[in-house]
Image (cartoon, rainbow, N blue to C red):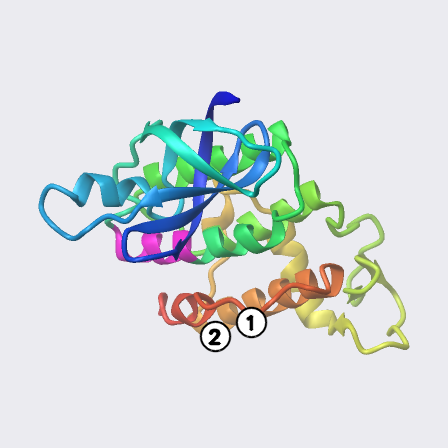
Amino acid sequence: MLQKSHGVVLYVVKYSDRSNIVHVYTEQNGQMSFLVPAVRRSRRSSAGAVLFQPFSLIGFETDVRPSTGLHPIREVEMWYPLVSLPFHPYKAGMAMFLAEFLYRVLQEEGGNEPLFNYVVSSIRWLDACEKDFSNFHLVFLIRLSRFLGFYPNLEHYVPGAFFDMLNACFVAARPSHGQFLSAEESSRILKLMRMNYDTMHLFAMNRAERNRCLEVIVGYYRLHLPAFPELKSLSVLRELFI
């Protein structure tokens, strides 16, 4: 059945010398996999290569085949051209990491319009932002957990509270299990949870602090998504910001 849709490119895997498998988070069906011709490096192919970079926003027509997990793309074009994200080294590094992250966590997700809109609006925001976006990936991941059903409960926070990562809440007493944050780190994470893209620049961090926040967030996801694997792009992201 032919179907037109929009999607976010997440991950590309080499299938053969002539074709690749592109994993796309789609507006209607959630994550889907498509077989596309491999783009050979040349001046003429540069536009085609951008189509399948992480976080590219594409419009396409595909032949949806329920009996298989691999669908051919008939037509593909840039749905929303990104001006800076594919070419800015820091933004491109973030996109590579977050796209791989989404590829892993959204594999079992079906069509979800609010989640799709959140991802697309976040990509557009990052593309348009000119400065002070160093905490973007942290805010994005924390807010993503709301759509996946394990956003932390902030109601019971008081100064000195511990964040119980296993039960996704703040508690006054140290939990008996080992999956919790100290009172100091809990306070830092709370501030991050309360931020949005427009206010996150107020939360100044050095690279070590930012990497620790990322470590905590990834660990939090692993607790709630036990099959969550190691991410190839994580080491790249850790080196991005000083």
* Circle 1 residue: 212
Question: Is residue 11 visible to the viewer in this orientation of the structure?
Answer: yes
Q: Residues within 10 Å of mark 1 (few under 14, many from 20)?
A: few
CB under 8 Å between discs 2 and 1:
yes
Magenta segment includes 19 = no
Instruction: Give the residues drawn in magenta, as a range.
Output: 88-96
Q: Residue at (53%, 29%) from the top-left corner? A: 64
Residue type, label 1: Arg
Rendered location of residue 86, percent (x, y): 28, 47
Q: Quadrant of the C terminus?
A: bottom left
Residue 188: give x, y in percent of width and height: 63, 63
Tell me: residue 74, above or below residue 223: above
In the image, is residue 42 above or below residue 80? below
Mark 2 to mark 1: distance in Å? 6 Å
Q: Residue furthest left?
A: 43
Q: Position of residue 77 (x, y in %)?
A: 31, 29
Q: Secondary structure at mark 1?
A: helix
Name the quadrant containing residue 219.
Answer: bottom right
Residue underneath mark 2: 208
Disc sitting over residue 105 in the figure:
none
